[in-house]
């Protein structure tokens, strides 16, 4: 089976890129990524700001969130920059480029025009096949400082484009007025690819201590919940771009990677999953991707790449708004717990002798079906309703 794909002019043996983070902080870690099957690594970002090179301890937290019956988690962290200085960083990149068989892409985050230009030239000099511009770090980045983020990103892109010839990738923040417009502007500036997206910056508060949690500042937060937002933008953007697009956010399974490819991604960057499960997670992702491709008899990605993007996603005008369905309770299964009645804003369910029943007031929204603890409710075609 051929899982290869093309990203900023580089052939990757599969779509999995280990995203910029401590997971690819040095040659030792990059080797682990390669051994477990990653097709490419993006090195931990080198920051021009020296203070960012020392991360506090501890720097990881898993924050649990509850909303009624829903549970979610955020992987919350404050791991800032590579601990290396610029010289050490690009020496490590040079070693990795010469040692590994997979592409090694450095990542830089600067505060001055000279810094962007100088680090980019050092990356090119170290033999990097491409360079990722981290203009989106949730701590200490352009986006964090406010102002006209889009203008600053374009200005950085232009400075670096004028400085080096290697393919350039801009890692976008989620907080943009239009990620597609931004990507289009970058395409016109000669940028070869975009990553959608870096993590968001968040905050949590320890109410007992009456202080922010962890290092008492803001922190990056992500998790499986990030996936759907990223997928939406990959699907909406990819048909309009002639440059590469890598998805980054919330990957938890091989199926997630497949979904990103359906949406049009050239490659997929994975980070949190590997932090939380070890580099073995890459083997698991590859097995799940292969299993899907085998089950569907696809020899490669050519038939699925971008299949569910752009016009394949219904527009507001195209959505079928007919009310064809109503909820119906299976009386044999209903335990009369009353959940359906409590959550119905149409006041449709009522208690009959044996169980709850859905009245004519049902709007067909389907929420009770999702919340019934014993799965006693189903949606039925209006005309078929008993
Ligand atoms: C601990 C940690 C460190 C990270 N460090 C960097 C970094 O140095 N540079 C960068 O561009 N992104 C960094 N990221 C963001 C990831 O590269 C990735 O884009 C993001 O976590 C979304 O992917 P995920 O949901 O698979 O984690 C980091 C993320 C985590 C969790």
Image: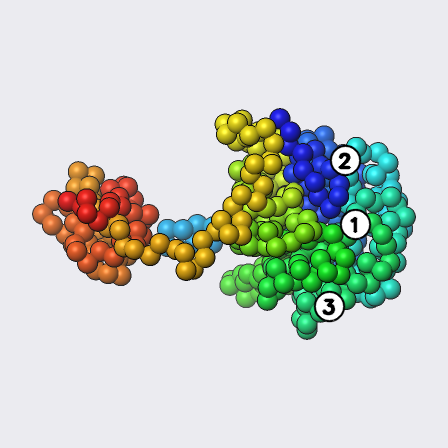
Q: CA distance from mark 1 to mark 3?
A: 20 Å
The C terminus appears in which quarter of the rendering?
A: top left
**Residue 12 image offset from top left, x and y in percent:** 71, 37
Do labels 1 and 2 touch, CB within 8 Å? Answer: no
Residue sitting at x 87%, y 49%: 124
Camera-nearest residue between 373 and 235: 235
Q: Is residue 275 left or right of residue 342?
A: right
Callout 1: SS: loop
Among numbered discs 1 and 3, the one appearing first in the sequence? 3
At label 2, counting other C-alpha atoms closer than 10 Å, the crowd grade (few under 14, some 14-19, many 20 or more) is: many
Q: Position of residue 302 (x, y in %)?
A: 60, 36
In this figure, which residue is indicated by the disc labeled 1? 167
Name the residue carrying label 3: 152
- Please report whichever mark, 1 or 2, sits nearer to the chain's N-terminal start: 2
Circle nearer the N terminus (2, 3)? 2
Camera-side residue: 291 or 214? 291
- CA gap between label 1 and label 2 equals 16 Å
Rendered residue at 86%/58% (across/down): 163
């Amino acid at each position: 089976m051929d899982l290869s794909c093309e990203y900023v002019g580089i052939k990757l043996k599969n779509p999995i890129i280990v995203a910029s983070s401590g997971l690819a902080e040095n040659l030792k870690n990059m080797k682990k990524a390669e051994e477990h099957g990653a097709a490419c690594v993006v090195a931990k970002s080198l920051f021009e700001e020296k203070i960012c090179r020392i991360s506090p301890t501890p720097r990881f937290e898993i924050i649990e969130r509850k909303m009624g019956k829903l549970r979610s988690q955020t992987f919350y962290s404050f791991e800032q920059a590579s601990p290396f200085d610029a010289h050490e960083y690009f020496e490590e990149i040079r070693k990795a480029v010469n040692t590994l068989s997979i592409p090694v892409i450095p990542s830089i985050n600067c505060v001055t025009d000279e810094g962007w230009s100088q680090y980019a030239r050092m990356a090119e000099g170290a033999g990097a096949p491409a360079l990722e511009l981290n203009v989106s770090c949730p701590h200490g980045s352009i986006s964090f400082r406010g102002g006209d983020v889009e203008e600053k990103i374009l200005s950085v892109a232009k400075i670096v484009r004028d400085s080096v010839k290697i393919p350039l990738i801009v890692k976008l923040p989620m907080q943009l007025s239009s990620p597609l417009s931004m990507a289009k502007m970058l395409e016109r500036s000669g940028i070869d690819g975009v990553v959608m997206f870096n993590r968001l910056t968040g905050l949590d508060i320890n109410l007992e201590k009456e202080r922010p949690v962890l290092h008492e500042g803001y922190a990056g937060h992500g998790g499986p919940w990030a996936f759907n937002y990223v997928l939406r933008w990959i699907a909406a953007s990819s048909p309009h771009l002639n440059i590469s697009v890598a998805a980054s956010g919330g990957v938890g399974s091989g199926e997630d990677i497949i979904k990103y490819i359906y949406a049009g991604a050239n490659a997929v960057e994975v980070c949190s999953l590997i932090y939380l499960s070890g580099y073995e997670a890459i083997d698991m992702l590859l097995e799940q991707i292969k299993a899907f491709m085998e089950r569907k008899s696809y020899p490669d990605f050519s038939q699925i790449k971008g299949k569910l993007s752009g016009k394949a996603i219904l527009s507001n005008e195209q959505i079928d708004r007919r009310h064809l369905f109503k909820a119906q309770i299976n009386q044999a299964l209903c335990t009369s717990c009353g959940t359906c009645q409590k959550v119905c804003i149409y006041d449709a369910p009522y208690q009959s002798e044996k169980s709850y029943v859905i009245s004519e007031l049902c709007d067909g929204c389907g929420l009770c079906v999702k919340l019934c603890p014993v799965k006693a409710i189903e949606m039925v075609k209006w005309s078929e309703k008993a």
